[in-house]
Structure formats: structure tokens, C-alpha cells
Amino acid sequence: MEDHVEKARNFLGIGFQYLDLSQKVALEIAKSGNVWMFVQEGTDFERMDKEYEEAVYWSDHKLVIPVLFNFYHGVELMLKGLLLLSKDEFKNHKLSAMLEKTKEHYNGAEFINYLEKYISRSSMPDILQLFFDISSMKVDEWYQALKYPESMKGKKYAYSSLKYQQENGVLFFRALNEDISLLRVNLVSHVRSNNPAMA
């Protein structure tokens, strides 16, 4: 039977892959300027369509939902890996409850701040707060809200609050990129220094 350290390593490893994907796309959106509209002239619509697609290739209106799904899935795997490392477990997608349990085992660890920033409503970036508020939901519903266009009860999610954010989107994605880097560095450092088997 797989021991808890190896199982934790597997969860953390795959979690980092989801976070890596989110980070790389977030960086590209921030670098591109998060363009979603620009003025074109002429009647060559095929050329204009191509130019438009190139201009908006990296933009929130096309990518924010899958980026956030991958990000939160990575966070979920991180939390589950950390709990497994502490010989604890969690069987659902409720990030807020997992975070509280993780804080019991890793109280004071710096990486907790980066997880809390995207899970706790009070510290969450404005763009995410607005999305959860307008959609009348908690962060724990992320698994449904970022995977399907409506809830199981048929309620539509407020995706428009995540899209077309222009400069605010650039700032959000730049911060997300930096936070993922800092989360990785702090989490790996803490885990390795406190768990010799993970070194």
C-alpha cells in the first residue's frame, strides 16, 4: 500500500502542474495587455478576422474560466497533498474547509497566506469577489462554477464579471503569476525543511 508521503508527493506534484499551466497563461495575458477590442478599417474581412484573433489570442474573455479552473484545481491538490503529508485526508472539493484543516497542521507557514488570498472572501482579489458575489455563491462551489455554464439547479454564473477587464485584468493576472511563484517557493521550502522524506 502506498505510504502517506508518496501519496502526498503525487498530489503536490500534479497540483504544481495545474498551477504551472495557470501561471504560464496568466503571464501571457498580462504581457499581451489583455486586449479584447481594437479598431480596424477596410473590407478584407478574412484578414480582419485573422488580425483580431491574433490580437486577442491571450485575453481574459477567452481564457479566464479555464485558467481559474486549473488554478483552483491545483490549489485543491496542494491542500489535499499537505493534508496527506500530515496523515489527514479530505474527500470533497470544499477549499475553505480544507484550508482550515491545513492551517491546523501548518499554522504560521508563509505559503498559507497565498492560499488564503484566493480562498477567503475577505482577502480575495476584487475580480474574484465580484464573480462570487454576483453569482451568489461561495468559493467552495468553484468546481461546478468553473466547469459548467450553470449550476445543477439551472442558475447561470456571472462570467461577464471575469471578462473584458482590460487593465484590471492585466493587474489580476500579473498578481496571480507572482502569487503562484511565491506559493511554490514557500510551500516547497517549508515542506522540505519540515519533512526530510520530501527532500
Image (cartoon, rainbow, N blue to C red):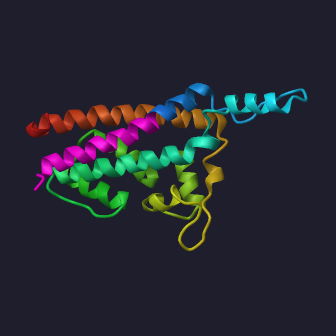
Give the magenta-colored segment's residue range: 1-23
Residue that appears at 24% across and 41% down? 109
7 or 179: nearer the eye?
A: 7
Residue that appears at 26% across and 44% down? 12
| Residue farthest to the right, as pictured | 43
Residue 103 visible to the viewer? no
Coordinates of residue 132 in the picture (x, y in percent): 54, 57
Task: Give yes or no for residue 135 being in the magenta stretch.
Answer: no
Q: Is residue 152 left or right of residue 47?
A: left
| Residue farthest to the front, as pictured | 46
Against 87, residue 195 (above or below) is above
The quarter holding residue 133 reads bottom right
Against 47, residue 92 (above or below) is below
Against 140, residue 184 (above or below) is above
Coordinates of residue 17 in the picture (x, y in percent): 36, 39
194 or 123: nearer the eye?
A: 194
Which is the main secondary structure of the residues drawn in magenta? Answer: helix
Total numbered labels placed on residues in the image: 0
Q: Is residue 77 left or right of residue 175?
A: left
Task: Give yes or no for residue 20 being in the magenta stretch.
Answer: yes
Q: Is residue 91 left or right of residue 18?
A: left
Q: Is residue 111 left or right of residue 86?
A: right
Residue that appears at 46% across and 32% down? 24
Residue 67 visible to the viewer? yes
Residue that appears at 60% across and 33% down? 58
Coordinates of residue 53 in the picture (x, y in percent): 70, 33
Against 4, residue 136 (above or below) is below
- Assign the C terminus to one quadrant of the image: top left
Coordinates of residue 4 in the picture (x, y in percent): 13, 52
- Assign the N terminus to one quadrant of the image: bottom left
| Residue farthest to the bottom, as pictured | 153
